Image (tube, grey):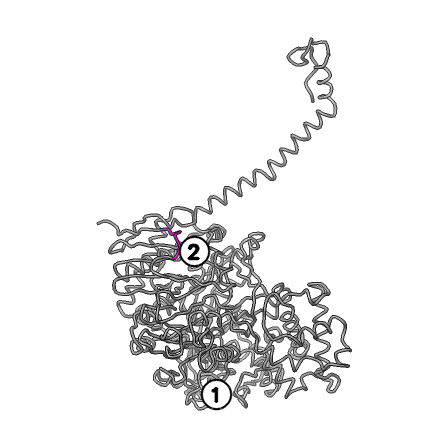
Amino acid sequence: MPPPLRSSPSILGGDGAGGNGGERWHKWLGAGWFMRRWRLAVAGVVLTAVVVPALVVVGLWLWLRGALPDYGGTFVVPGLGAPVLVVRDSRAVPRIRAATLDDAYTALGFVHAQDRLWQMEMARRIGFGRLAEVFPVWAGDWAFRMDRSMRTLGFHRLALSSYDALALEVRKSLDAYAAGVNAWLKTRRGPLPIEFQLLGYEPEPWRPADGLVLGKLQALQLSGNFRDELLRARLLTKLSPRQVEDLFQSDPAGAPVTVAGDFSVAGDSMASLFDRVAAGLPPPLGPCLASNEWVVAGWRTTSGKPVLANDPHLAMQAPVLWYLARIETPELTLSGATVPGVPFHLLGHNGTVAWGVTITGGDTQDVFVERLDPADRSRYLAPDGPVSFETRREIIKVRGGPERTVIVQTSRHGPVLPEDSPLAVTKAAGGHVLALAFTGLSAADTTSEAYYRLNRARDWDSFTAALRLVQSPQQNFVYADTGGTIGFYAPGLVPIRARGNGLVPVPGWTGAYDWTGMVPFAALPHSVNTAGGSIVNANNAVVGPDYPYLLAAQWPESWRAQRINDLLGPSGRGGPSGLASLASSVAIQFDVVSLPARMLLPLLLPREGADTLALSKMARVAVALLRRWDGSMLRDRPEPLIFSWWLREFSRQLFAERLGPLFREYWSLRPRVIEHILTEAPSWCDRPGEPGTRTCFDLKQASLEASVRALAERHGDEPLRWRWGDEHVAVFEHPLLAQVPLLGRFFALNIPADGDGYTINQAASPISSANMPFSDVHGPGLRAVYDLADLDHSLFMISTGQSGNPLSPHYRDMVSSWRDGALVSLTATPPTAVTKTMSLLPQSR
């Protein structure tokens, strides 16, 4: 209510008799008074609903920005023997200058923790099987299933025992690195990164063996054969062996694809067992096979010294796996790619030797079907009679729920794979379980020591001596040194099988398929100073049919390797002089010609004339575009989008009904399979159970029309305006923040990209995705090129940025450069004037 009317000059103004002041008062009493009150109310609401939350958000933002590290400070670091200088360039790439390598490793642990603590913590928790204790139970059971799998494999226990098996100097380096990580945890001057704030916990100290757990995870991710075995076994319950052979055309001609043995037992269904185990597995850690590497001898290069190029491909994520760093000590200088959590350079050069890595694809996993003892299910059958499982009990803590007990049992072949129950073995409905044999389950794994010694190699002999220590995963190393030597070696443990080819699960109770040993190191594929002057690998087969051992019965398709060889040519052409160079190798890394597209288009396109005229107008325009296309997967062109969508739809119509629930697990573009069906196995184009009712021509036409309709719905009905980059977007998602509403979109790093899953500039897509089937989710997170004539000016690029903190300017500052072909050098003196210098000092005594 307004105040009572009084005759007061102090209120009415004027002479107090109701002049102009009174008129103003009456106006205030009328509509104006209510409007003022309304405005005050609205202002209060705005203040409460908008301004205060905005101030809170700004305050929270500023507080979280306090977690950004001080790149220019001075810190006391226990364990250092002498001061260490860390100089970061404009992209936050550190140059670490130390008196000893162990001091340098301490500093590397410090800067890794500054920039990538959450990445290190997440990987460690995955390997330990301790995700469920920090991710709330309402987020789903994925964390528990991941924990159960890791506890089953026992990576934490294996890492601890492997640490004890390493040489003393290697353990000292791991100790020094852990000291650096923990020094940052103790001296940090702001809050922990945002991920810890969201989940509400603090990390435990870093232990020297923790980095070995990360190595175990890498070995598992890059050795995914057992999932393929399960898929084949499940397909064989629906299709004939010949049909399954049709579906995997990268196999050698005539390779047998049959379930090795009779598993049928009264009351037990193998199909059900395979399905139960598949259902119990967590999502894979990521796609496993794709990388490029090549090395060209000096007599074929412009500098007269070898040129080496490498771009390992992994799942896209933010931050990327790799972290660039340069270490300088009186005894050794190292430049290249590290992985946060590990002190050694996994890829790079040491001033004398440069090396690169791709995955071999050797089959180092087998699934054995163990037959349970009918009289005692805590035992299983072996060639000499029943044997007891080794059994241990694992307690998994679950945030927001009761802790859960997992019974882990191990046979003579390996750990029993969990089914869709945490007590899989004791609750097995039938008479069998599945056990995994895997070379990555060694309790004395020396792979980390191999990298320690590889970092110090000075020639081919010391390099190969280091590779003898590699156990898992098996990888292809290319080598070059300043003396002009080039070489290749594929080290790692590869089993020798008494029988079988590793494509499907095998009986464990007979002993007929047991591993009898490992391929000798000297017999593993290798070459030095080849007569042709170049070595190329892009995950293609490393041996031919005459090789005396079985490395793998199935190899990835060789499209990228073929294209690299074509571009290098017999004389290494690529530069103006026809010889290989740093620049020409960078250009090859960014090549986007799809050889599968060039192969398949003549098989897919309708003949000119009546076949083309029978199509709709949009389809005819699409066909006209494809007829003139050279197969380049450029983001600003429509042809790559039309071709890829058409191939996807053709595959869906071809396989979906026949494969049923297994279709999505199998679904990818598979050019060799499509070629095989269109040229040699056209019966697949029939409708299931209705032979002769549909031809491959019918299927091609129908899938083309369905494709252009789908594209029109998404991008309009003018094919000339469609763009590959509208769908083919490189997506770097933060594994935690991507799941948070609003935050996920704000922190996502997305950029339209060239290439596809078969180009040298590899950019693979999740074809089975309903909403984003052609997003770019797998590719070169790192590119590196080395000219042995001037190693200090080697070129590098990672796909996101050095920092893992989404609030840092270095979280995303390399994305555009990575996409567009710019690389940076790690010279001793940063090439830019913008630097930050941090001093790490020993603790005074």
* Disc 2 from disc 1: Cα separation: 51 Å
Q: Considering only vertical position in the picture, is 299 above or below 635?
A: below
User: For mark 2, does the 10 Å Cα neighbourhood hold few (<14), some (14 to 19), or many (20 or more) residues?
Assistant: some
Q: Is residue 722 magenta?
A: no
Specify whether 165 is left or right of 754. left
Q: What kind of element bears circle 1?
A: loop
Which residues are the magenta region? 831-836
Q: Considering only vertical position in the picture, is 188 above or below 478?
A: above
Q: Residue at x 52, y 83 (%)?
A: 504
Q: Quadrant of residue 129?
A: bottom left
Query: Which residue is nearer to you in this view: 510 or 448?
Result: 448
Q: Amino acid at mark 2?
A: Arg
Q: Residue at x 55, y 63 (%)?
A: 730
**Residue 785 image point, x, y percent:** 42, 69
**Labels 2 and 1: the sequence-earlier one:** 2
Whether tag 2 and tag 1 are in contact, CB under 8 A, the answer is no
Q: Nearer the viewer, mark 2 or mark 1?
A: 2
- Mark 1, residue position: 500
- Mark 2, residue position: 91
